[in-house]
């Protein structure tokens, strides 16, 4: 299963609501996760099973989707949200999206 | 808090090998699969394979068979990945990650840079 993320680069302002897209080449059956990756840091799991918020992650992060189309939404963007975000599917094997770089 | 601490950057010559480590803490090391993932700049992430530390069972994605070898030392809660016959295409960041109970990679190491150059 291939995953296509868009956009590859997203510029937004503090307080904005942003949406990141992850589209699979086939049905992922909601086994879709989102991670945040900051330079030099360990990737951090944000969302799993499409819309379940990982413990300790702020509620401004949310996930949605079904079938082959999934979205990560960040409400009220904060400066510390500057990072790269990648999705990955674990329905069939394990594959990753190419990532979205979010800047403010 | 679950932590995976990886070894530092490696600079290696083509044809040689490097051994990366991933030390786990604050969870039962033997009870969770440990995955390895490759990331090349601008190319996204690739799954290399995984090891189950309790019994050493492992699995490699087709692309990395013969390239990577996983081992685990349960006495030190440390997993290792040996990368052999290095080429410039092996230059990348390598991450270890734990497969959590929900079937998702829920904890990641900070990554280790490998640079292959003569």
Image: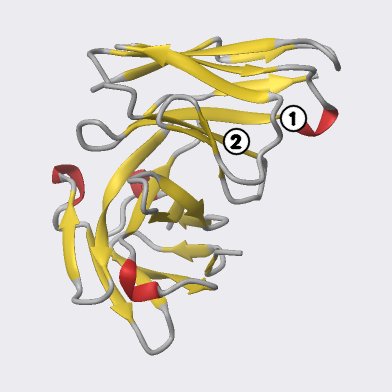
Considering only vertical position in the picture, is B22 above or below B105? below
The answer to whether marks 2 and 1 sit on the same chain is: yes
Q: Which mark is residue A36?
A: 2
The picture places residue A70, in percent across and down from the top left corner, at 43, 14
Label 2 marks which chain's residue? A
Report whether B89 appears left or right of B66.
right
> Marks 2 and 1: CB-CB under 8 Å?
yes
* Residue of label 1: A81
The picture places residue A38, in percent across and down from the top left corner, at 66, 40
Count of numbered badges drawn on the protein: 2
Considering only vertical position in the picture, is B39 above or below A74? below
Report whether A33 appears left or right of B15.
right
* Residue shown at the point (24%, 31%) measured from the top left: A91
Colouring: secondary structure
Report whether B97 appears left or right of A53.
left
Quadrant of the image occupied by residue B79? bottom left
Q: In the rendered view of the protein, which quadrant contains the C terminus of chain B?
A: bottom left
* Residue shown at the point (57%, 28%) measured from the top left: A85
The picture places residue A64, in percent across and down from the top left corner, at 48, 16
Q: Upstream in the sequence, badge 2 or badge 1?
A: 2
């Amino acid at each position: 299963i291939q995953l296509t993320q868009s956009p590859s680069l997203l510029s937004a302002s503090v307080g904005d609501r942003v949406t990141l897209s992850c589209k699979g080449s086939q049905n992922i059956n909601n086994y879709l996760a989102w991670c945040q990756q900051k330079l030099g840091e360990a990737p951090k799991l944000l969302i799993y099973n499409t819309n379940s918020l990982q413990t300790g992650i702020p509620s401004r992060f949310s996930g949605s989707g079904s079938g082959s189309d999934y979205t990560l939404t960040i409400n009220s963007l904060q400066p510390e949200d500057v990072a790269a975000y990648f999705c990955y599917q674990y329905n069939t094997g394990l594959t990753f999206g190419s990532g979205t770089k979010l800047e403010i | 808090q679950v932590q995976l601490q990886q070894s530092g950057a490696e600079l290696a010559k083509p044809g040689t090998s490097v051994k990366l480590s991933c030390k786990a803490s604050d969870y039962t090391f033997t009870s969770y699969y440990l995955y390895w993932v490759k990331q090349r700049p601008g190319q996204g992430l690739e799954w290399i394979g995984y090891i189950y530390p309790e019994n050493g069972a492992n699995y490699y994605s087709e692309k990395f068979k013969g390239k990577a070898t996983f081992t685990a030392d349960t006495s030190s809660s440390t997993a290792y990945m040996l990368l052999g016959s290095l080429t410039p295409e092996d230059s990348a960041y390598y991450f270890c990650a734990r497969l959590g109970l929900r079937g998702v990679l829920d904890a990641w190491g900070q990554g280790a840079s490998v640079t292959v150059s003569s």
